[in-house]
Every structure is written in C-alpha cells, then in structure tokens.
Image (cartoon, rainbow, N blue to C red):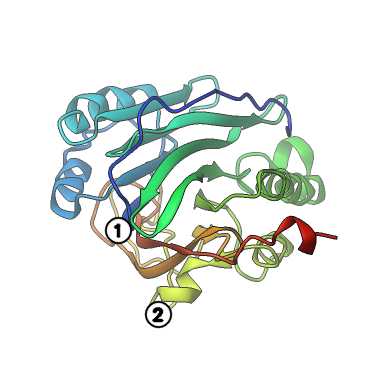
C-alpha cells in the first residue's frame, strides 16, 4: 500500500447517530510554539473531527492536554526524524486503518475509519484520510522537480486506489501541496468531488498566511494548497459538503485551517445480485 500501509481491526463502539459532522483540517507548521490560539478556536467552533498535519511532538503534548475534555478519541503519529507528523482528535470513536510512507520520505497519509449510525441509513463505515502530500520546497533538491511531481502524483494515486478498493464513502483532507492547475489536482478531481467547489465561497486561498513561515509577519493567502475532497454519493451511504470556509485567524502557521460541514446522505442504491454483470 504505497510504501507501508498497516491495518487495524474493529471499532470498539458505535458512535452516536450522525447525520452531519464538522471537520477541521489544519497544517500546524512544524515550529514549536504555544497552541493556545488554536485551542481557543476549537472551543469556539467545536468541530466533531480535527485533522492536523505537521503535528510534531510538542504540538501533540499540548493538544493531548487541551483537547482531552471534549475529544475523547485521539491519535498522535509524530515523525520526528522528518519534523512532521499527523494528529487526529474526534468526538466519535474511530480505528486507524491505514498509514502510508514512501521509503526515505515523510509519511503522507493516515486513514481512520468511523462506524456511522444514521437514522435513515443502515450503519456504515466512513473513511477519513488525513494527508500531506510531498512538498515542492523541501525535496526538490533531493530528487529534482520532475521526479518530485511524479512522486506527488504517485502518492495521490495510492490513496485513490485505496478508495476504489474499499468501496465505501471517504473524505480526503489536508495539505495537498499542489494548486488547482496541476496534473495532481486534476488526477484527484477526476475521481473525487472538491468540497470547496461544492460549498465554498470565493477563491478558497489558504496559503501563505505568513510572509515567512517562521517569522510573525502576516500575509494574505494567494493559493489553494489545502483541500477537502470526497467520494460523493457513489455508495449505499454518501457524502456531501454543505458548508466550507477558510479560517483566517492568526494561529502561528503559514497555512489557514479549513472548516467543513459534511452531511451523510443516501447514496446510489446497491444493485441486486441479478443486476451485477
């Protein structure tokens, strides 16, 4: 599975009935700092699911303490040798069902699975991929620009293949490190629905929030690098995004968080055995 997937079995308990949930995704930036502004934002917005990229060990320590009261289900996956890592905090129980790292490079995806119980839809599994595909700035000196672009497309392709193999509703959210005009974006948009185009207003720019990532000088974002994409209604239960916004608060990162409202809906009817060719 793209250089090191691993599967976990089972989800201990079913979550509450879920017809909609709010998801926040945020590249924290791998610099050590106080995360009090982020915790205040979370307390104000109260998303159901938090996805963090570049979640280093010092971030995880603060978030473990600061989020524990409202988010009983938490997972920290720091990769200190790369100054990277993922963090996931949720009101709903989940299982880690996948983790991907290309050999010699930082991890680029982690998948968690929730067992959603919907009042109108039979209980179904729902996959959420927290992603940070390879950066064009840090690795171009190692592999060259062409190989770097191809590797990013490979990483996205592995995630898309997993979605196709598992055949259940999924959201892919995080720092994609690519713009809308790239082949990598078009590759993903050919299979998934861009939540911002579905429910966002304006250009959706999320980067750079700072003129220099490590200096406290704010800037107005001019690019979309952070995305939430999903599978739509292609399965027995489906996904639609009904609201999405970029949060411009000063949180110490060069990225802005995205906050999305996701509705769990009926998908395409599953064909009977006689209808399957």
Q: Quadrant of residue 263?
A: bottom left
Residue 66: image location, x then y, percent = 18, 31
Tell which residue pokes out farthest to the bottom in this image. 202
Instruction: State whether residue 217 appears in this view.
Output: yes
Q: Residue 10 carries which label?
A: none
For image coordinates 55% across by 26% down, the residue present is 82
Is there a contact, CB below 8 Å, between mark 1 and mark 2? no
Which residue carries the number 1 mark?
Answer: 218
Residue 160 higher or lower than 191, as above or below: above
Q: Quadrant of residue 132?
A: top right
Residue count near mark 2 (Cα–Cα under 10 Å), binned few <14, some 14–19, many ≥20:
few
Q: Which residue lies furthest to the front in this view?
A: 274
**Which residue is under mark 2?**
202
The C terminus - image quarter: bottom right
Secondary structure of the residue carrying tag 1 is: loop
Query: Residue, x 40% and y 66% (percent of image)?
Result: 221
When the figure is inspected, residue 186 is found, relative to residue 130, above or below; the finding is below
Q: Residue, x 45% and y 51% (percent of image)?
A: 122
**In terms of secondary structure, where does tag 2 sit?**
loop
Q: Is residue 186 left or right of residue 50?
A: right
């Amino acid at each position: 599975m793209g250089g090191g997937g691993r599967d976990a079995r089972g989800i201990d308990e079913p979550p509450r009935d879920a017809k909609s949930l709010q998801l926040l995704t945020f590249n924290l930036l791998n610099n050590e700092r106080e995360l009090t502004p982020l915790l205040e934002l979370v307390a104000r917005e109260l998303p159901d699911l938090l996805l963090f990229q570049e979640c280093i060990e010092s971030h995880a320590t603060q978030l473990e303490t600061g989020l524990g009261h409202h988010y009983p289900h938490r997972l920290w996956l720091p990769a200190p040798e790369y100054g990277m890592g993922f963090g996931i905090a949720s009101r709903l129980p989940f299982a880690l069902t996948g983790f991907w790292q290309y050999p010699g490079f930082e991890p680029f995806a982690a998948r968690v699975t929730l067992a959603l119980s919907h009042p109108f839809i039979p209980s179904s599994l729902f996959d959420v991929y927290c992603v940070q595909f390879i950066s064009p700035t840090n690795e171009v000196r190692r592999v060259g620009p062409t190989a770097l672009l191809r590797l990013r497309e490979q990483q996205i392709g592995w995630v898309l293949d997993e979605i196709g193999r598992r055949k259940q509703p999924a959201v892919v959210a995080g720092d994609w490190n690519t713009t809308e005009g790239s082949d990598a974006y078009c590759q993903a948009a050919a299979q998934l629905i861009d939540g911002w185009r579905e429910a966002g207003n304006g250009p959706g720019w999320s980067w750079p929030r700072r003129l220099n990532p490590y200096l406290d000088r704010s800037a107005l974002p001019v690019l979309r690098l952070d995305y939430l994409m999903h599978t739509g209604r292609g399965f027995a239960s489906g996904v639609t995004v009904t609201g999405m916004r970029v949060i411009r608060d000063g949180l110490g990162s060069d990225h802005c968080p995205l906050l999305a409202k996701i509705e769990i809906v009926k998908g395409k009817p599953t064909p009977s055995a006689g209808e399957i060719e």
